[in-house]
Amino acid sequence: MPAVTDCAKSPKLAAARGFTLVELLVVIAIIAGIAALLLPAIMKAREAGRSTTCMSNLRQLGIGLQRFKDTNGYYVAYRIEDPTYVNKFGVVRPRWQWLIGDVLGRPAQNLDAIQASGGTDTTYTNVPLDNEIFLDPSLNFASPSAYSAPGNASIRSGAYGYNFQYLGNSRNMTDGDPTTPALNYPVRRIIDESRTIAFGDSRGGNIPHGAHSMTLDPPHERPRPDGSVVNSPSPNAALMPGFDPYGPDEVGTDIVIYFSPAEERHNGRANVVYLDDHVESHTLEELGYVVQNGVAQPQTSPTLTTASPWGSNAFWNGVGYDETSPNYSKVQ
């Protein structure tokens, strides 16, 4: 009678036995644990790649702004306010994206779509931006926004905002009346270009992202040198006599917060390009904002003061010091 074979003593039979259920579960658990450890690093690396693309876009916008200034002698307006103005492509009252796109040699939006929309200032805003330098890959452009037709690729609620308040605030003293003076346009000279933001990741008048992100508002409103009161539907205009209102000034459900600050969408940081074309990545606090629970807060104090949380416009106003600084007047 042949002897019974012991698997433990037979290498061939032991190898053929395979994994037990417990062993298989242990291996799966180890793999899942390794994947869980690697996933944040993978996601962070992916976002770092998106941030690099974003920085490249912003640098192109900065170059376009400088070309515009070299050609015209002043910084671009955030929007042409003259209701009769039509550019060579048939766009009525074009916004800064069109003005910069023209300088860089490529339209901001599809011209066939513009023509199909009618080309007026109330229709072309429903045509998505299709020039990639205006599109941050960290934003989901298929998601709805306050202007839901083009989502986050909207020319009004897209990726990047312009420091219009100190560089090209073409809105008028009497809102909607182009015969009254512009708030701060044209601006021909900036003292410290290396410490003056031109464009950056913008949030818009909603959380987490929303309408009128085409403007990038500084931490506090711009004090008017003449102390005049601006006519504006924004509630900030009534709260802040003698200051220019923040960007989103219309009324309605599309704007929840009348304030379009920078947005920390690249691993907790916001990308900005300065007037000398160098790009940096900052936290909201580094940019001068007053932050509560991770959200930048609009400042509505009736006076410019350091006595309460106010924020700093040092990287925005072209001087390199906030208006509350004793050094501000020395370098103007």
Image (cartoon, helix red, strand yellow):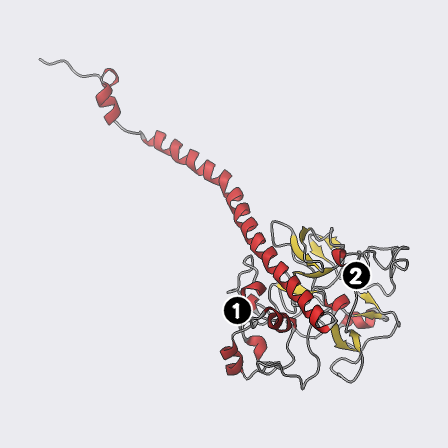
Q: Quadrant of residue 94?
A: bottom right
Determine whether label 2 and label 1 are within 8 Å by CB: no
Which numbered circle lies on residue 130?
1
Marks 2, 1: nearer the viewer:
2
Query: Can the viewer see residue 42?
Result: yes
Q: What residue type is labelled 1?
A: Asp
Count residues near mark 1 (Cα–Cα under 10 Å), then give few for <14, some for 14-19, many for 20+. some
* Quarter of the figure with residue 209: bottom right
Is tag 2's residue or tag 1's residue first in the polypeptide sequence? 1
Q: Position of residue 234 (x, y in %)?
A: 75, 73
Tell whether 241 sits left or right of 262: right
At mark 1, the secondary structure is loop
Q: How many labels does the image show?
A: 2
Q: Is residue 176 above or below residue 305?
A: below
Left or right of 4 in this view: 81: right
- Tag 2, which secondary structure? loop
- Name which residue lies at 59% across and 60% down: 57
Q: Quadrant of the C terminus?
A: bottom right
Q: Position of residue 242 (x, y in %)?
A: 86, 70
| Residue 151 location, quadrant | bottom right
Q: Where residue 238 sits in the image (x, y, percent)?
A: 82, 72
x and y, in percent, of residue 282 in the image: 69, 51
Residue 208 showing in the rendered view: no
Examine the rendered structure and indicate whether residue 93 appears above or below residue 298: below
| Amino acid type indicated by mark 2 | Gly
Q: Which mark is residue 318?
A: 2
Q: Which residue is drawn at 82% across and 55% down?
A: 309
